[in-house]
Image (spheres, rainbow, N blue to C red):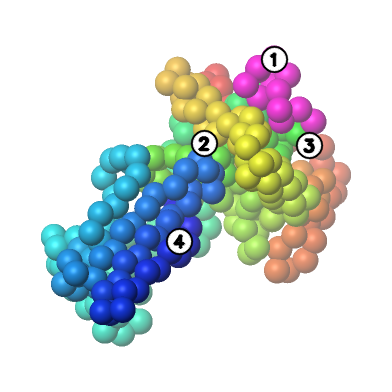
Amino acid sequence: GFQLYLHSFVVTKEGEWAVVQQGMNPNERMARRYHWLSSSLRSFMEEPHTSVCGQNQGQILNLTDRHATPTKKGILELTKETPDKLMREVSLILPRHHEVKAEDVNLKRLGTSLILAHETNVADMESLLLLEGVGPRTLQSLTLVSEVIHGTPSRFSDPARFSFAHGGKDGHPFPVPTSVYDETIEVFDKAIRQARLGDKDKSEALKNLSILSQEMEKGYTPNNYFDKLIEHERSNSYKYGGKTVYGDAQKPKGKGGTQLSLWDE
């Protein structure tokens, strides 16, 4: 999104005024300018800008558009509803269980993210060389986080899928792998800082993770790997500093590591 800054504000002796406001996209390092002129202003709530200058980004949500009046009324009506009524409405579209189940996620989409991370030789991928040194488990998280940032709305029909990036504090679908969590933040933080200096190579590499995952998805048929995935993550959670509100993840007793296959057998 764009971060807004006041660029200039001019007032005449007669009381007329003009404002040039700038919205900066920190990722693209591009600006959009909003021009306000008191002589043409009729309302601050409905189409107040004299002009908006910038590259066309397609359809956007503009609540100051005169056609957005029904939407604004709907938002105001929601603020008048009691919380318990709103929660009853929400429960109609959410699963009536807390744990993550196979039917809550698109196994094809989740599987390709995992294959990219665990069954692909990343060193052979030119577009991902900038992520050299990142382990498979962190790459799994980076791929899912990348899709949250760069994915289109149609990719979010099963939001439970993204819980497989960093687990949950209650242990569902598995404990939070704190070392992976920290490394994911570090990688994105470094990419953001470099992008602000004009070096977008690392941020582009992170964006390519979601693109590659979607390309792999086209030829992938998943098997019934979901239960094995949960067992695998929970069994190995201790290796990544796994934590829940109930305590630290423990190494399984008398049990070897689980083997996980994501391909149809």
> What is the total number of numbered labels drawn onto the structure image?
4
Q: Considering only order in the chain, which callout, 3 or 2, is on the residue closer to the N terminus?
A: 2
Q: Specify the segment rendered in magenta.
A: 121-133
| Picture layout, residue 200 above or below residue 183 | above
Q: Considering only order in the chain, which callout, 2 or 4, is on the residue closer to the N terminus?
A: 4
Q: Considering only order in the chain, which callout, 3 or 4, is on the residue closer to the N terminus?
A: 4
Question: Which numbered disc, 4 or 3, marks the residue closer to the eye?
Answer: 4
Determine which residue is flagged by label 3.
257
* Along the viewing direction, whichever of 152 and 163 lies nearer the viewer: 152
| SS type, badge 1 | helix
Determine which residue is flagged by label 1.
124
For this view, does 7 lie left or right of residue 178? Answer: left
Amino acid type at image mark 3: Gly
* Along the viewing direction, whichever of 101 and 202 lies nearer the viewer: 202
Asked if the stretch drawn in magenta spans residue 128, the answer is: yes
Considering every residue shown, the one lying at the far right of the view is 254
Please give the label number shown on residue 7: 4
Q: Considering only order in the chain, which callout, 4 or 1, is on the residue closer to the N terminus?
A: 4
Determine which residue is flagged by label 2.
110
**Mark 1 Cα shell of 10 Å, populated few (<14), some (14-19), many (≥20):** few
Amino acid type at image mark 4: His
Amino acid type at image mark 2: Leu
Majority secondary structure of magenta residues: helix
- Cα distance, mark 2 to mark 3? 21 Å
* Quarter-of-image position of residue 88: bottom left
Amino acid type at image mark 1: Asp
| SS type, badge 3 | loop
